[in-house]
Image (tube, rainbow, N blue to C red):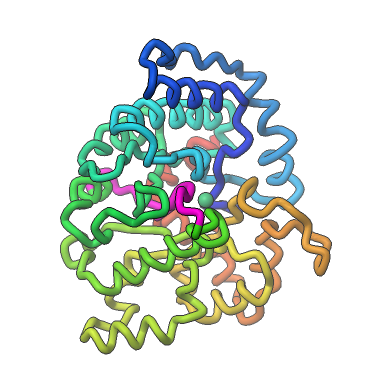
């Protein structure tokens, strides 16, 4: 089976955006505050938003299950207060839950967290617990930069983040380290901010000793790990100079990379450099890059055939990338997949 560990609801009905705009307007004028009941989206609208997009692509490409979360750029944690983020997360996650309930064979949920700049992520514990224990979600997206482009929070290895890690460990769910939009015009959001976020998170893990405190905590770094695989020698060398253990010991029991790399040479490098146990299949469709590559006549984000064509991978390696590693990193998938096969 083919599990895509990285998809966002980028095609949600426009009512979701209208709700968000009203929420933002209410920051200036509280009489404009929307109630979550105002989000009137029918099941048919949800079906329509997916049938011609994510579901069509799953069928065409032969993938089975997408680990699905709210639109990453839409999280926009810098907007408003923690209360703003709490209300927005509940609504966004509730919609993901409806998608997963309508299409339990195709989608399983990952939640947005109600982060807010300068606010302890302790405020995210309740929403994570609700999503996992009540809605059946299998993980969360953690934004290392809730300021959305200005990097004001301490590194991910700081005790600041420990309250959410403690809950992740207790629930046995991983986080995808995923930035949101960029308010900083110096950083294009998907072209620079995303890749910076991935690279920065990895280097923070190199510098710290987080997994001594949390030996079972797990992170997926998306977009192929940013610049990390390409510069693997640099990171091994930095760890060595800092007298850290070898990266395989220091991080690779806890840190995983996805395959959202949109060309064959990039996937070839990823699968050659990074241990196969640390690579999870993903496409991030429908997402960052929606066009067709004229060099291959395929969608850039059709990453499955890159894995199939990557040299040096055995059938066992491909099984790990497509399915086995996801089951290990997201253990709550087991229950979901067992129900799916009934
Ligand atoms: Zn993403």
Question: Does 288 sit left or right of 330 as displayed?
Answer: right
Question: Does 303 sit left or right of 326 as displayed?
Answer: right
**Camera-side residue of 111 and 20:** 20
Q: Quadrant of residue 47?
A: top right
For the stretch drawn in magenta, what is the main secondary structure? loop
Identify which residue is drawn at 35% across, 28% down. Answer: 84
Tally of numbered tags: 0
Question: Does 187 sit left or right of 30 as displayed?
Answer: right
Q: Is residue 182 magenta?
A: yes
Name the spot of residue 145 as percent of width and height, x first. 35, 52
Q: Is residue 174 magenta?
A: yes
Name the spot of residue 322 as percent of width and height, x first. 57, 60
Q: Quadrant of residue 10?
A: top right
Span shown in magenta: 170-185
Identify which residue is drawn at 29% across, 54% down. Answer: 152
Name the spot of residue 202 as percent of width and height, x first. 37, 68
For the C terminus, which image quadrant?
A: top right
Identify which residue is drawn at 70% across, 51% down. Answer: 290
**Camera-side residue of 329 and 141:** 141
Identify which residue is drawn at 59% across, 68% down. Answer: 318
Name the spot of residue 62 as percent of width and height, x first. 71, 51
Question: Eyeballing the image, is 142 above or below 187?
Answer: above
């Amino acid at each position: 089976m083919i599990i895509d560990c990285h998809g966002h609801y980028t095609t949600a009905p426009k009512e979701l955006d209208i709700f968000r705009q009203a929420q933002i307007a209410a920051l200036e004028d509280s009489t404009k505050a929307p109630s979550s009941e105002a989000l009137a989206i029918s099941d048919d609208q949800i079906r329509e938003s997916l049938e011609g997009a994510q579901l069509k692509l799953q069928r065409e490409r032969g993938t089975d299950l997408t680990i699905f979360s709210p639109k990453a750029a839409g999280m926009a944690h810098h907007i408003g207060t923690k209360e703003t983020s709490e209300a927005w997360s509940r609504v966004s996650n509730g919609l993901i839950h409806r998608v997963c309930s309508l299409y339990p064979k195709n989608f399983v949920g990952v939640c947005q967290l109600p982060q807010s700049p300068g606010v302890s992520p302790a405020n995210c514990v309740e929403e994570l617990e609700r999503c996992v224990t009540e809605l059946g979600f299998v993980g969360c997206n953690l934004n290392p930069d809730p300021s959305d482009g200005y990097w004001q929070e301490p590194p991910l290895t700081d005790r600041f983040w420990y309250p959410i890690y403690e809950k992740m460990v207790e629930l046995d769910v991983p986080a995808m380290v995923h930035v949101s939009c960029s308010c900083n015009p110096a950083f294009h959001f998907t072209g620079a901010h995303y890749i910076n976020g991935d690279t920065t998170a990895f280097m923070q893990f190199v510098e710290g000793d987080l997994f001594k405190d949390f030996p079972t905590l797990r992170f997926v770094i998306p977009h192929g790990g940013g610049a990390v695989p390409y510069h693997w020698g640099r990171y091994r060398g930095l760890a060595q100079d800092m007298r850290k253990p070898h990266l395989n010991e220091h991080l690779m029991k806890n840190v995983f990379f996805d395959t959202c790399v949109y060309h064959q040479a990039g996937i070839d490098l990823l699968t050659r450099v990074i241990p196969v146990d640390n690579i999870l299949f993903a496409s991030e469709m429908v997402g960052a890059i929606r066009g067709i590559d004229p060099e291959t006549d395929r969608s850039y984000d059709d990453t499955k055939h890159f894995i199939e064509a990557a040299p040096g991978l055995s059938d066992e390696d491909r099984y790990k990338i497509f399915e086995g590693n996801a089951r290990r990193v997201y253990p709550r998938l087991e229950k979901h997949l067992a129900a799916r096969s009934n």
